[in-house]
Amino acid sequence: MGYAAPQRPQIPTLPMQPLRRPRRLLAGSFFLLSTALLFPSCGADDAPSASSPDEPGAARTQAPRSQVNPAEAALKKGAALAEANDIEGAAEAYREAVRLDPSSAKAHLALGRTLMALSRVSAGRGGDAVGADGGVDLGQDEEKLAEAVSELKRASELAPEDPDTLYWAGRALHVANQGNDAIAVLTRAVELDPAHGPAWKRIGLVHLENGDVEAARDAFEKAEPLLPEDPGIAFQLGNVLAEEDPAAARDAYRRSVETDPTFSPAYNGLAGVLGRLGDVEGAAEARANSKRWRAFLDRTRAVAAKANRNPNDKGIQIKAGELYLAHHAWTQALEYFDRALSLDASDPQVHLYCGIASRERGDLERARQHLEEALYLAPTALEVRMELISALVAQKDQARLRELLDETGAAVSSMDAETRISYGQHLAELGLDEDASVQFQGVLDTDPDDEAARAALEALASHGENG
Protein backbone atom coordinates (compact mmCIF):
# COMPACT_ATOMS: atom_id res chain seq x y z
CA MET A 1 0.00 0.00 0.00
CA GLY A 2 1.60 3.29 -1.13
CA TYR A 3 1.98 6.54 0.70
CA ALA A 4 -1.26 8.55 0.63
CA ALA A 5 -0.54 12.24 1.11
CA PRO A 6 -3.12 14.23 3.07
CA GLN A 7 -5.04 16.94 1.28
CA ARG A 8 -3.06 20.15 0.85
CA PRO A 9 -2.54 22.63 -1.99
CA GLN A 10 -0.04 21.05 -4.36
CA ILE A 11 2.49 22.48 -6.73
CA PRO A 12 0.37 23.34 -9.80
CA THR A 13 -0.13 20.58 -12.36
CA LEU A 14 -1.00 20.83 -16.03
CA PRO A 15 -4.48 21.93 -17.10
CA MET A 16 -6.69 19.63 -19.18
CA GLN A 17 -5.72 16.37 -17.49
CA PRO A 18 -5.40 13.32 -19.75
CA LEU A 19 -7.89 10.53 -19.29
CA ARG A 20 -5.43 8.05 -17.85
CA ARG A 21 -3.98 8.91 -14.45
CA PRO A 22 -0.96 11.18 -15.02
CA ARG A 23 2.26 11.23 -13.17
CA ARG A 24 2.66 14.63 -11.60
CA LEU A 25 4.24 17.12 -13.98
CA LEU A 26 5.56 19.96 -11.93
CA ALA A 27 5.19 23.59 -12.87
CA GLY A 28 6.64 26.09 -10.36
CA SER A 29 8.65 28.75 -12.17
CA PHE A 30 8.34 26.87 -15.48
CA PHE A 31 4.77 27.30 -16.65
CA LEU A 32 3.23 24.87 -19.12
CA LEU A 33 1.20 26.79 -21.67
CA SER A 34 -2.17 25.56 -22.88
CA THR A 35 -1.34 25.86 -26.57
CA ALA A 36 -1.97 23.48 -29.40
CA LEU A 37 -0.62 21.46 -32.30
CA LEU A 38 -2.17 19.33 -34.94
CA PHE A 39 -2.48 15.67 -33.95
CA PRO A 40 -2.70 12.65 -36.23
CA SER A 41 -5.49 12.46 -38.75
CA CYS A 42 -8.66 10.72 -37.65
CA GLY A 43 -8.38 8.14 -40.42
CA ALA A 44 -5.54 6.38 -38.62
CA ASP A 45 -3.80 6.16 -41.98
CA ASP A 46 -0.57 7.66 -40.72
CA ALA A 47 1.51 7.10 -37.64
CA PRO A 48 1.20 9.94 -35.12
CA SER A 49 4.79 11.06 -35.11
CA ALA A 50 6.52 12.97 -37.88
CA SER A 51 9.56 10.79 -37.19
CA SER A 52 7.62 7.65 -38.07
CA PRO A 53 8.47 5.72 -41.25
CA ASP A 54 4.74 5.85 -42.05
CA GLU A 55 4.65 9.66 -42.08
CA PRO A 56 3.56 11.18 -45.42
CA GLY A 57 5.87 14.21 -45.22
CA ALA A 58 8.58 14.94 -47.71
CA ALA A 59 11.59 12.65 -47.74
CA ARG A 60 14.63 13.83 -45.80
CA THR A 61 17.49 12.09 -47.54
CA GLN A 62 21.03 12.45 -46.19
CA ALA A 63 23.87 12.59 -48.68
CA PRO A 64 27.36 11.26 -47.88
CA ARG A 65 29.68 13.83 -46.37
CA SER A 66 32.61 13.06 -48.62
CA GLN A 67 32.93 12.69 -52.40
CA VAL A 68 29.62 14.42 -53.05
CA ASN A 69 28.75 14.20 -56.76
CA PRO A 70 26.19 16.51 -58.40
CA ALA A 71 23.28 14.11 -57.89
CA GLU A 72 24.14 13.66 -54.24
CA ALA A 73 24.45 17.43 -53.86
CA ALA A 74 20.93 17.79 -55.29
CA LEU A 75 19.68 15.20 -52.82
CA LYS A 76 21.29 17.08 -49.97
CA LYS A 77 19.71 20.33 -51.17
CA GLY A 78 16.32 18.63 -51.33
CA ALA A 79 16.70 17.33 -47.78
CA ALA A 80 17.53 20.82 -46.51
CA LEU A 81 14.53 22.32 -48.29
CA ALA A 82 12.26 19.60 -46.93
CA GLU A 83 13.55 20.27 -43.42
CA ALA A 84 12.69 23.95 -43.93
CA ASN A 85 9.17 22.85 -45.04
CA ASP A 86 9.73 24.04 -48.62
CA ILE A 87 8.15 20.94 -50.12
CA GLU A 88 7.85 22.33 -53.66
CA GLY A 89 11.50 23.34 -53.60
CA ALA A 90 12.48 19.91 -52.29
CA ALA A 91 10.61 18.24 -55.14
CA GLU A 92 12.48 20.33 -57.71
CA ALA A 93 15.82 19.47 -56.11
CA TYR A 94 14.95 15.77 -56.16
CA ARG A 95 13.88 16.05 -59.83
CA GLU A 96 17.32 17.43 -60.55
CA ALA A 97 18.90 14.49 -58.69
CA VAL A 98 16.90 12.04 -60.83
CA ARG A 99 17.93 13.89 -64.00
CA LEU A 100 21.58 13.78 -63.00
CA ASP A 101 21.49 10.10 -62.00
CA PRO A 102 18.48 8.20 -63.41
CA SER A 103 19.85 4.97 -61.92
CA SER A 104 19.67 6.26 -58.33
CA ALA A 105 16.97 4.45 -56.37
CA LYS A 106 17.54 6.93 -53.56
CA ALA A 107 16.71 9.89 -55.83
CA HIS A 108 13.55 8.27 -57.21
CA LEU A 109 12.47 7.34 -53.69
CA ALA A 110 13.00 10.86 -52.35
CA LEU A 111 11.12 12.41 -55.26
CA GLY A 112 8.28 9.91 -54.99
CA ARG A 113 7.82 10.42 -51.28
CA THR A 114 7.83 14.19 -51.71
CA LEU A 115 5.28 13.99 -54.49
CA MET A 116 3.12 11.88 -52.19
CA ALA A 117 3.11 14.75 -49.73
CA LEU A 118 2.33 17.28 -52.44
CA SER A 119 -0.50 15.15 -53.80
CA ARG A 120 -2.61 16.01 -50.76
CA VAL A 121 -4.17 19.45 -51.26
CA SER A 122 -6.17 21.77 -49.05
CA ALA A 123 -8.04 25.03 -49.28
CA GLY A 124 -5.15 26.75 -47.54
CA ARG A 125 -1.65 26.35 -48.97
CA GLY A 126 -1.78 23.70 -51.68
CA GLY A 127 1.61 22.30 -50.74
CA ASP A 128 0.70 21.32 -47.20
CA ALA A 129 -0.07 17.67 -46.63
CA VAL A 130 -3.51 16.80 -45.35
CA GLY A 131 -4.61 20.34 -44.71
CA ALA A 132 -1.81 20.97 -42.22
CA ASP A 133 -2.20 24.70 -42.70
CA GLY A 134 -5.62 24.56 -41.12
CA GLY A 135 -7.45 24.66 -44.44
CA VAL A 136 -10.08 22.20 -45.58
CA ASP A 137 -8.72 18.99 -47.05
CA LEU A 138 -9.74 18.84 -50.71
CA GLY A 139 -8.45 15.33 -51.37
CA GLN A 140 -5.91 14.06 -53.87
CA ASP A 141 -4.05 15.78 -56.70
CA GLU A 142 -4.29 12.89 -59.15
CA GLU A 143 -1.55 14.18 -61.43
CA LYS A 144 1.01 14.44 -58.65
CA LEU A 145 -0.11 11.09 -57.26
CA ALA A 146 0.39 9.40 -60.62
CA GLU A 147 3.88 10.87 -60.85
CA ALA A 148 4.63 9.71 -57.30
CA VAL A 149 3.52 6.17 -58.19
CA SER A 150 5.75 6.19 -61.24
CA GLU A 151 8.79 7.39 -59.30
CA LEU A 152 8.30 4.95 -56.44
CA LYS A 153 7.73 2.01 -58.78
CA ARG A 154 10.98 2.91 -60.52
CA ALA A 155 12.74 3.11 -57.15
CA SER A 156 11.47 -0.35 -56.25
CA GLU A 157 12.74 -1.72 -59.58
CA LEU A 158 16.17 -0.26 -58.89
CA ALA A 159 16.22 -1.49 -55.27
CA PRO A 160 14.10 -4.68 -55.28
CA GLU A 161 15.69 -5.97 -52.07
CA ASP A 162 15.09 -2.85 -49.99
CA PRO A 163 11.92 -3.25 -47.86
CA ASP A 164 11.57 0.48 -47.18
CA THR A 165 11.55 1.30 -50.88
CA LEU A 166 9.05 -1.48 -51.52
CA TYR A 167 6.88 -0.19 -48.68
CA TRP A 168 6.69 3.29 -50.19
CA ALA A 169 5.89 1.88 -53.63
CA GLY A 170 3.13 -0.24 -52.09
CA ARG A 171 1.80 2.69 -50.13
CA ALA A 172 1.57 4.84 -53.26
CA LEU A 173 -0.18 2.06 -55.17
CA HIS A 174 -2.71 1.73 -52.34
CA VAL A 175 -3.45 5.47 -52.31
CA ALA A 176 -3.87 5.27 -56.11
CA ASN A 177 -6.51 2.54 -55.64
CA GLN A 178 -4.32 -0.20 -57.09
CA GLY A 179 -4.91 -2.54 -54.16
CA ASN A 180 -3.85 -5.83 -55.72
CA ASP A 181 -0.54 -4.40 -56.94
CA ALA A 182 -0.05 -2.77 -53.53
CA ILE A 183 -0.52 -6.09 -51.73
CA ALA A 184 2.03 -7.80 -53.98
CA VAL A 185 4.69 -5.15 -53.33
CA LEU A 186 3.97 -4.87 -49.60
CA THR A 187 4.02 -8.64 -49.18
CA ARG A 188 7.50 -8.67 -50.70
CA ALA A 189 8.53 -5.96 -48.21
CA VAL A 190 7.49 -8.03 -45.18
CA GLU A 191 9.08 -11.14 -46.67
CA LEU A 192 12.37 -9.24 -46.71
CA ASP A 193 11.74 -7.67 -43.29
CA PRO A 194 9.08 -9.43 -41.18
CA ALA A 195 9.45 -6.66 -38.56
CA HIS A 196 8.45 -3.85 -40.94
CA GLY A 197 5.54 -2.41 -38.99
CA PRO A 198 4.41 0.25 -41.50
CA ALA A 199 4.20 -2.38 -44.26
CA TRP A 200 2.08 -4.69 -42.09
CA LYS A 201 -0.17 -1.77 -41.19
CA ARG A 202 -0.61 -0.85 -44.85
CA ILE A 203 -1.37 -4.47 -45.75
CA GLY A 204 -4.08 -4.44 -43.11
CA LEU A 205 -5.60 -1.24 -44.51
CA VAL A 206 -5.68 -2.63 -48.05
CA HIS A 207 -7.26 -5.90 -46.92
CA LEU A 208 -9.82 -3.98 -44.87
CA GLU A 209 -10.82 -1.91 -47.89
CA ASN A 210 -11.08 -5.10 -49.94
CA GLY A 211 -13.40 -6.65 -47.34
CA ASP A 212 -10.95 -9.38 -46.28
CA VAL A 213 -11.49 -8.98 -42.54
CA GLU A 214 -9.45 -11.98 -41.41
CA ALA A 215 -6.41 -10.97 -43.46
CA ALA A 216 -6.74 -7.41 -42.16
CA ARG A 217 -6.91 -8.64 -38.56
CA ASP A 218 -3.82 -10.78 -39.04
CA ALA A 219 -1.87 -7.85 -40.48
CA PHE A 220 -2.92 -5.40 -37.78
CA GLU A 221 -2.05 -7.92 -35.05
CA LYS A 222 1.43 -8.19 -36.55
CA ALA A 223 1.78 -4.41 -36.89
CA GLU A 224 0.63 -3.39 -33.40
CA PRO A 225 3.65 -4.62 -31.38
CA LEU A 226 5.99 -3.29 -34.07
CA LEU A 227 4.53 0.25 -33.90
CA PRO A 228 3.59 0.59 -30.22
CA GLU A 229 3.26 4.39 -30.41
CA ASP A 230 0.75 4.38 -33.27
CA PRO A 231 -2.85 4.54 -31.94
CA GLY A 232 -4.29 3.96 -35.40
CA ILE A 233 -3.40 0.28 -35.50
CA ALA A 234 -5.30 -0.70 -32.36
CA PHE A 235 -8.14 1.53 -33.59
CA GLN A 236 -8.32 -0.33 -36.89
CA LEU A 237 -8.07 -3.65 -35.07
CA GLY A 238 -11.04 -2.57 -32.96
CA ASN A 239 -12.96 -1.82 -36.15
CA VAL A 240 -12.18 -5.30 -37.47
CA LEU A 241 -13.29 -6.98 -34.23
CA ALA A 242 -16.32 -4.82 -33.45
CA GLU A 243 -18.99 -6.99 -35.07
CA GLU A 244 -17.96 -10.48 -33.99
CA ASP A 245 -16.03 -9.83 -30.76
CA PRO A 246 -17.09 -6.54 -29.12
CA ALA A 247 -15.19 -7.32 -25.91
CA ALA A 248 -11.92 -7.72 -27.83
CA ALA A 249 -12.78 -4.60 -29.84
CA ARG A 250 -13.33 -2.70 -26.58
CA ASP A 251 -9.86 -3.71 -25.42
CA ALA A 252 -8.33 -2.65 -28.74
CA TYR A 253 -10.02 0.77 -28.66
CA ARG A 254 -8.83 1.24 -25.09
CA ARG A 255 -5.27 0.44 -26.12
CA SER A 256 -5.60 3.07 -28.82
CA VAL A 257 -6.59 5.84 -26.42
CA GLU A 258 -4.01 4.71 -23.87
CA THR A 259 -1.39 5.20 -26.57
CA ASP A 260 -2.77 8.60 -27.53
CA PRO A 261 -5.48 10.08 -25.26
CA THR A 262 -6.28 12.66 -27.96
CA PHE A 263 -7.21 10.11 -30.64
CA SER A 264 -10.91 10.89 -30.91
CA PRO A 265 -11.99 8.23 -33.47
CA ALA A 266 -11.14 5.48 -31.01
CA TYR A 267 -13.56 6.96 -28.48
CA ASN A 268 -16.34 6.74 -31.05
CA GLY A 269 -15.59 3.07 -31.63
CA LEU A 270 -15.31 2.48 -27.91
CA ALA A 271 -18.70 4.11 -27.31
CA GLY A 272 -20.27 1.81 -29.85
CA VAL A 273 -18.98 -1.45 -28.44
CA LEU A 274 -19.58 -0.40 -24.83
CA GLY A 275 -23.19 0.29 -25.75
CA ARG A 276 -23.52 -3.18 -27.23
CA LEU A 277 -21.95 -4.64 -24.09
CA GLY A 278 -24.52 -2.84 -21.92
CA ASP A 279 -22.13 -0.30 -20.38
CA VAL A 280 -24.35 2.75 -20.86
CA GLU A 281 -22.32 5.00 -18.56
CA GLY A 282 -19.03 4.04 -20.18
CA ALA A 283 -20.46 4.62 -23.65
CA ALA A 284 -21.66 8.09 -22.66
CA GLU A 285 -18.24 8.94 -21.24
CA ALA A 286 -16.52 7.76 -24.42
CA ARG A 287 -18.81 9.90 -26.59
CA ALA A 288 -18.11 12.92 -24.40
CA ASN A 289 -14.38 12.32 -24.70
CA SER A 290 -14.65 12.02 -28.46
CA LYS A 291 -16.45 15.36 -28.64
CA ARG A 292 -13.93 16.94 -26.29
CA TRP A 293 -10.88 15.86 -28.27
CA ARG A 294 -12.42 16.62 -31.65
CA ALA A 295 -13.09 20.19 -30.52
CA PHE A 296 -9.56 20.34 -29.13
CA LEU A 297 -8.06 19.24 -32.44
CA ASP A 298 -10.11 21.83 -34.32
CA ARG A 299 -8.65 24.55 -32.12
CA THR A 300 -5.07 23.41 -32.62
CA ARG A 301 -4.74 23.48 -36.41
CA ALA A 302 -3.62 27.09 -36.62
CA VAL A 303 -0.82 26.49 -34.10
CA ALA A 304 0.22 23.35 -35.97
CA ALA A 305 0.51 25.23 -39.22
CA LYS A 306 2.52 27.98 -37.58
CA ALA A 307 4.95 25.51 -36.01
CA ASN A 308 5.43 23.61 -39.26
CA ARG A 309 5.86 26.74 -41.33
CA ASN A 310 8.30 28.32 -38.90
CA PRO A 311 10.83 25.63 -37.91
CA ASN A 312 13.27 28.35 -36.80
CA ASP A 313 10.82 29.93 -34.37
CA LYS A 314 11.86 28.58 -30.98
CA GLY A 315 8.79 29.88 -29.19
CA ILE A 316 6.24 28.13 -31.38
CA GLN A 317 8.20 24.86 -31.20
CA ILE A 318 8.09 25.05 -27.40
CA LYS A 319 4.36 25.74 -27.44
CA ALA A 320 3.79 22.74 -29.67
CA GLY A 321 5.91 20.52 -27.44
CA GLU A 322 4.14 21.75 -24.33
CA LEU A 323 0.79 20.80 -25.77
CA TYR A 324 1.97 17.27 -26.54
CA LEU A 325 3.57 17.05 -23.09
CA ALA A 326 0.35 18.10 -21.38
CA HIS A 327 -1.47 15.24 -23.05
CA HIS A 328 1.25 12.63 -22.52
CA ALA A 329 2.20 12.36 -26.19
CA TRP A 330 5.84 11.97 -25.19
CA THR A 331 7.38 11.15 -28.58
CA GLN A 332 5.73 14.06 -30.35
CA ALA A 333 6.66 16.41 -27.51
CA LEU A 334 10.31 15.42 -27.79
CA GLU A 335 10.30 16.05 -31.51
CA TYR A 336 9.37 19.71 -31.04
CA PHE A 337 11.51 20.24 -27.96
CA ASP A 338 14.49 18.82 -29.83
CA ARG A 339 13.84 21.33 -32.57
CA ALA A 340 13.73 24.11 -29.96
CA LEU A 341 17.02 22.94 -28.45
CA SER A 342 18.64 22.92 -31.89
CA LEU A 343 17.86 26.64 -31.96
CA ASP A 344 18.91 27.34 -28.35
CA ALA A 345 20.56 24.63 -26.28
CA SER A 346 20.80 26.86 -23.20
CA ASP A 347 17.12 26.88 -22.23
CA PRO A 348 16.67 25.02 -18.91
CA GLN A 349 12.90 24.87 -19.31
CA VAL A 350 13.17 22.90 -22.55
CA HIS A 351 15.73 20.54 -21.01
CA LEU A 352 13.30 19.99 -18.12
CA TYR A 353 10.52 19.13 -20.56
CA CYS A 354 12.81 16.76 -22.47
CA GLY A 355 13.75 15.08 -19.22
CA ILE A 356 10.12 14.53 -18.26
CA ALA A 357 9.13 13.19 -21.68
CA SER A 358 12.20 10.96 -21.94
CA ARG A 359 11.61 9.49 -18.49
CA GLU A 360 7.97 8.75 -19.28
CA ARG A 361 9.07 6.97 -22.47
CA GLY A 362 11.43 4.84 -20.40
CA ASP A 363 14.65 6.40 -21.73
CA LEU A 364 16.18 7.04 -18.31
CA GLU A 365 19.67 7.86 -19.53
CA ARG A 366 18.42 10.54 -21.89
CA ALA A 367 16.12 11.86 -19.16
CA ARG A 368 19.03 12.16 -16.76
CA GLN A 369 21.21 13.94 -19.30
CA HIS A 370 18.55 16.57 -19.96
CA LEU A 371 17.71 17.03 -16.29
CA GLU A 372 21.35 17.34 -15.26
CA GLU A 373 21.76 19.99 -17.95
CA ALA A 374 18.64 21.79 -16.73
CA LEU A 375 20.05 21.74 -13.19
CA TYR A 376 23.36 23.16 -14.41
CA LEU A 377 21.50 25.96 -16.21
CA ALA A 378 18.98 26.61 -13.40
CA PRO A 379 20.53 25.39 -10.14
CA THR A 380 17.91 27.07 -7.93
CA ALA A 381 14.86 25.61 -9.71
CA LEU A 382 13.23 23.17 -7.26
CA GLU A 383 11.06 21.52 -9.93
CA VAL A 384 14.20 20.56 -11.88
CA ARG A 385 15.70 18.99 -8.77
CA MET A 386 12.51 17.07 -8.03
CA GLU A 387 12.31 15.65 -11.55
CA LEU A 388 16.00 14.71 -11.46
CA ILE A 389 15.47 12.96 -8.12
CA SER A 390 12.66 10.95 -9.73
CA ALA A 391 14.94 9.97 -12.61
CA LEU A 392 17.77 8.96 -10.27
CA VAL A 393 15.40 6.81 -8.22
CA ALA A 394 14.29 5.05 -11.40
CA GLN A 395 17.90 4.69 -12.53
CA LYS A 396 18.98 3.44 -9.08
CA ASP A 397 22.05 5.67 -8.93
CA GLN A 398 22.29 5.79 -5.15
CA ALA A 399 25.49 7.85 -4.96
CA ARG A 400 24.25 10.70 -7.14
CA LEU A 401 20.79 10.48 -5.56
CA ARG A 402 22.23 10.85 -2.06
CA GLU A 403 24.31 13.82 -3.14
CA LEU A 404 21.32 15.57 -4.70
CA LEU A 405 19.01 14.80 -1.75
CA ASP A 406 21.45 16.26 0.75
CA GLU A 407 22.07 19.35 -1.35
CA THR A 408 18.36 19.95 -2.04
CA GLY A 409 17.29 19.19 1.51
CA ALA A 410 19.65 21.86 2.83
CA ALA A 411 18.32 24.40 0.34
CA VAL A 412 14.65 23.58 0.98
CA SER A 413 15.09 23.88 4.77
CA SER A 414 15.00 27.67 4.45
CA MET A 415 11.85 27.75 2.32
CA ASP A 416 8.23 28.20 3.38
CA ALA A 417 6.23 25.41 5.00
CA GLU A 418 4.03 24.70 1.98
CA THR A 419 7.04 24.23 -0.31
CA ARG A 420 8.76 21.95 2.22
CA ILE A 421 5.66 19.81 2.64
CA SER A 422 5.12 19.55 -1.14
CA TYR A 423 8.75 18.52 -1.55
CA GLY A 424 8.42 16.00 1.28
CA GLN A 425 5.30 14.50 -0.29
CA HIS A 426 7.16 14.12 -3.57
CA LEU A 427 9.93 12.24 -1.76
CA ALA A 428 7.38 10.06 0.04
CA GLU A 429 5.76 9.12 -3.26
CA LEU A 430 9.19 7.96 -4.45
CA GLY A 431 9.64 5.81 -1.34
CA LEU A 432 12.24 8.14 0.20
CA ASP A 433 10.51 8.10 3.58
CA GLU A 434 13.46 9.16 5.72
CA ASP A 435 14.16 12.26 3.65
CA ALA A 436 10.45 13.07 3.51
CA SER A 437 10.20 12.79 7.29
CA VAL A 438 13.03 15.29 7.71
CA GLN A 439 11.04 17.87 5.74
CA PHE A 440 7.78 17.31 7.62
CA GLN A 441 9.54 17.35 11.00
CA GLY A 442 11.44 20.47 10.04
CA VAL A 443 8.18 22.32 9.49
CA LEU A 444 6.88 21.13 12.86
CA ASP A 445 10.07 22.21 14.58
CA THR A 446 9.42 25.73 13.31
CA ASP A 447 5.65 25.66 13.87
CA PRO A 448 4.38 22.84 16.14
CA ASP A 449 0.80 23.80 15.23
CA ASP A 450 1.14 23.18 11.49
CA GLU A 451 -1.65 20.66 10.95
CA ALA A 452 -0.70 19.85 7.37
CA ALA A 453 2.85 18.90 8.35
CA ARG A 454 1.58 16.78 11.25
CA ALA A 455 -0.94 15.01 9.01
CA ALA A 456 1.77 14.33 6.42
CA LEU A 457 4.09 12.93 9.08
CA GLU A 458 1.34 10.70 10.46
CA ALA A 459 0.47 9.44 6.98
CA LEU A 460 4.12 8.64 6.41
CA ALA A 461 4.34 6.76 9.70
CA SER A 462 1.18 4.82 8.88
CA HIS A 463 2.60 3.91 5.52
CA GLY A 464 5.76 2.63 7.19
CA GLU A 465 3.79 0.49 9.64
CA ASN A 466 1.77 -1.07 6.81
CA GLY A 467 4.71 -2.17 4.88
Image: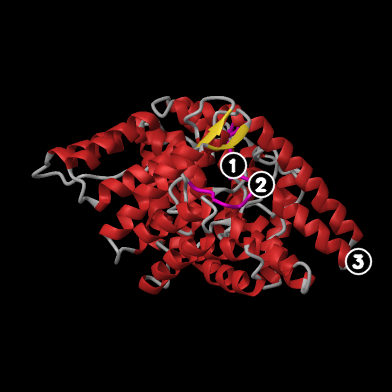
Which label was assigned to residue 262?
2
Label 3 – label 2 distance at C-alpha: 25 Å
The one nearer the camera, 144 or 219, is: 144
> Along the horizontal axis of the image, is 297 left or right of 84?
right
The one of 211 and 80 positioned closer to us in this rendering: 211
* Residue 147 left/right relative to 99: right
Tell me which numbered mark, 3 or 2, is placed earlier along the sequence: 2
Q: Which mark is residue 190?
A: none
Q: Earlier in the sequence, mark 2 or mark 1?
A: 1
Q: Describe residue 447's horizontal placement relative to residue 112 as left or right.
A: right
Residue at 82% from the left image edge and 49% from the top image edge: 287
Task: Tell me if label 1 and label 3 are in contact, CB under 8 Å.
Answer: no
Residue on which disc 3 sits: 278
- Mark closer to the chain start, 1 or 3: 1
- Where disc 1 sits, the SS reads loop
Query: How far apart are the alpha carbons under marks 2 and 1?
Result: 8 Å
Quadrant where the C terminus sits is: bottom right
Task: Name the amino acid type tagged 1.
Answer: Phe
Residue at the disc numbered 1: 39
Amino acid on which the number 3 mark rests in the picture: Gly
Residue 44 part of the magenta-drawn span: yes
Q: Nearer the viewer, residue 168 or 31?
A: 168
Q: Which secondary structure dominates the residues rendered in magenta?
A: loop
**Residue at 61% of width from left, 34% of height from top?**
137
Q: Residue at x 91, y 59 (%)?
A: 280
Q: Are marks 2 and 1 in contact (CB under 8 Å)?
A: yes
Tell me the kind of residue under disc 2: Thr
User: Over which residues does the magenta segment extend?
Assistant: 32-49
Residue 154 visible here:
yes
Label 3 crowd bin: few (<14), some (14–19), many (20+), radius 10 Å = few
Residue 318: where, in percent of width, then height? 49, 32
